[in-house]
Image (tube, rainbow, N blue to C red):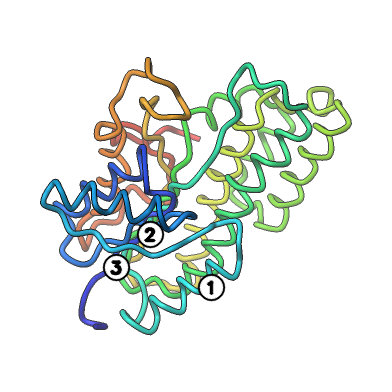
Amino acid sequence: MSGVRVAVVTGSNKGIGLAIVRALCKQFQGDVYLTARNPKLGEEAVKTLNNEGLSPLFHQLDINDLTSIRCLRDFLKEKYGGLDVLVNNAGIAFKGDDKTPFGTQAEVTLKTNFSATRDICNELLPIIKPNGRVVNVSSIYSHINLLRCSPELQEILRSDTITEDELVKLMEKFVEDAKEGVHQKSGWPHSAYGVSKIGVTVMSRIQARQLKETRKGEGIILNACCPGIVRTDMAGPNAEKSPDEGAVTPVYLALLPTGVDSPYGQLVSDKKVIPW
């Protein structure tokens, strides 16, 4: 099967993830895997797309479980010899009126949106094939909340030389500060989701830089993106975009043609680069 191309979308049994799978089934030449933590919900989502005449495949994936991530990695290596397209869509957000203490919100949100996405990348980026495409779903709130950070933090988070270890330590510091109630005094914005997506955007910039150094000439392109404010469980029923409209930019980046070299390592919204 190593001649067959393969795409994987994380957290794709509903919302934007499901819409990305739908679009890839129509536009990507190869197998498309819908993934979900709960196999029952995943299989139901596959049936929904089957009823639309589409043929996604299913693989269980809990991005908070390293064993689950490695099971998917080993499956892809054995069946396809690697991976052509990875869309890291899985993520969470607390509602604005949630009474959970902010320190807990910070810990839980960064664990999934930043740390688990980083785990997925650490396990799956090494098996991305030449000319592969990687899309980390971030948010415009990463940019909005970057501007709410102290000038000192902004300088570090915009740096072209920040390392992954330095970024991890910064994200850990935010959680510690949030638990102690001093995050704003330390220069952070009051948004667990926003900081988690700052982490995703900066991580994407670092990963793109590393790919250029370690896999030069292989044509792999990695970007972060903002789907927009989409009518999902996360953003609510009054958001401006439908899930299918929210899928447009992630799918555009996932299907960038062979031979292009930009956008690369950028935050992209509505198919346009947002200067970081």
Where in the figure is residue 54, as x and y percent of width and height? 15, 54
**Split into 4 quadrants, where in the image is the N terminus?**
bottom left
Q: Amino acid at mark 3?
A: Asn
Task: Quote the CA–CA distance across marks 3 and 1.
Answer: 22 Å
Q: What residue is drawn where x is 25% and y is 31%?
A: 245
At numbered mark 2, what does the secondary structure look like: helix, strand or loop?
A: strand
Residue occupied by mark 3: 131
- Sequence order check: which comes first, mark 2 or mark 3? 2
Q: What residue is drawn where x is 47% and y is 34%?
A: 139
Residue occupied by mark 1: 70
Where in the figure is residue 64, as x and y percent of width and height? 60, 56
Q: Amino acid at mark 2?
A: Leu
Q: How many residues crowd around disc 3 within 10 Å: few (fewer than 14), some, or many (20 or more)?
A: some
For the view shown, which residue lies furthest in the left direction?
53
**Foreground disc of the pair 3, 1:** 1
- Sequence order check: which comes first, mark 1 or mark 2? 1
